[in-house]
Amino acid sequence: MITGCKTVKFILLTAVALLLFSCRHLPDIQKATDIPVTGGEAGDIKGFFLLNEGNMGSNKATLDYFDYGSGVYMRNIFATLNPGVTRELGDVGNDIKIYGGKLYAVINCSNLVEVMDLRSGKHIAQISIPNCRYITFDSGYAYVSSYAGPVELDPTSRKGYVAKIDTLTLSEVATCVVGYQPEEMVVNKGKLYVANSGGYRVPNYDHTVSVIDLSTFQVVKNIDVAINLHRMEIDKYGYIYVSSRGDYYDIPSTVSVINSATDEVVDFLELLPCTDMTICGDSLYVYSTSWNNFTQSNTVSYAIYDVKRKMVVSRNFITDGTEKEITVPSGIAVNPETKEIFIADAKDYVTPGMLYCFTKDGKKKWQVSTGDIPAHIAFTTKELK
């Protein structure tokens, strides 16, 4: 799938890569024939970073980068740009976000958050947080959810916590104990909402969302939602969408809706299973790879929920039939400028995955090979130099 280039910029990028990185293994630079050179089409978005999780215990988390201006996709850039980091990116990449000119990658089993310079991709610091999961930001601080204990099923496991990080000093300044095995978080009007899973305590899952007052950094409420919570998104109307994985037997995956004005559950989207989701405008894009222990199989589905009209408007946002090419969806993102839809595919989980780009109408534009288990995307308005 890799052919010659179409632009002078691609030739220059390749030449620079050869000159700068000859002392270390080169990044895998791809220019697929069906990746369009978009130029200014993407608006302020210059590109995106994709964090590949890698297999647990293999130390194979990697970072890819796509440049919109040239259509160049580069795999495994962190190792090349940071030859002095001996363990490279680490073990299991779980989340990636951009804030204040820095790129933050949460590396779960390596118990750290890797902080990089956004423009150069160079290592700045590592923040140690045990069994860290997800990250979000507000008013100069990063908030990182932590399971607080080792990676193991344990019915007596301790409660997790959220670490508060000063983004200037990159040091931990406070912690707040929440529920068991906390996952994704959202911030709204001075409050941090934390989805608690209790996944290590199976079958006694947690079923709460912890609400933290950021002015005191104390839990002020626990909202009873559903078991085994995971993903969170918030719309512009102040409604929070929280996914439940269910119990993988009789209780299916669902999405609950919390009104952040009252901190109460106001809707339960029983017919909307969710593994991951993202909001763009009034559209909540959802995919599900719901595993069932009875059938020993996944049920894959895609949907769009209109958060304004409060209704499912599509049961498959891929409209040209190419969803049949996707084996195991493992990540989703929507470009806020072009409305392009990106679906990552983990394939067999042990070999390189695939990233698919679809138009806003759900037709495939291009695809490209990634690292192992591609999952998390962060769009950037600053071009990687």
Image: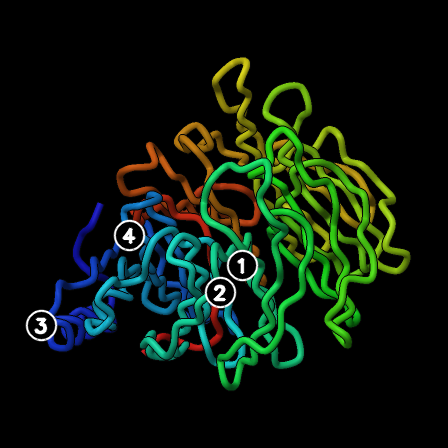
- Residue projecting furthest to the left: 23
Element on which disc 1 rests: loop
Q: Amino acid at mark 4?
A: Asn
Residue at image point 40% right, 40% down: 345
Residue at image point 33% right, 75% down: 123
Which callout, 2 or 4, points at the residue further toward the start of the chain? 4
Residue underneath mark 4? 59
Mark 2 and mark 4: Cα distance apart in space:
25 Å
The vertical placement of 349 against 2, above or below, is above
Element on which disc 4 rests: loop
Query: What is the x, y in percent for residue 233?
Result: 68, 53
On the rendered image, what quadrant is the N terminus found in? Answer: top left
Name the mark nearer the viewer: 4 or 3: 4
The vertical placement of 218 against 331, above or below, is below
Residue underneath mark 3? 23
Residue underneath mark 2? 379
Q: Are marks 1 and 2 in contact (CB under 8 Å)?
A: yes
Which callout, 4 or 1, points at the residue further toward the start of the chain? 4
The vertical placement of 148 against 381, above or below, is above
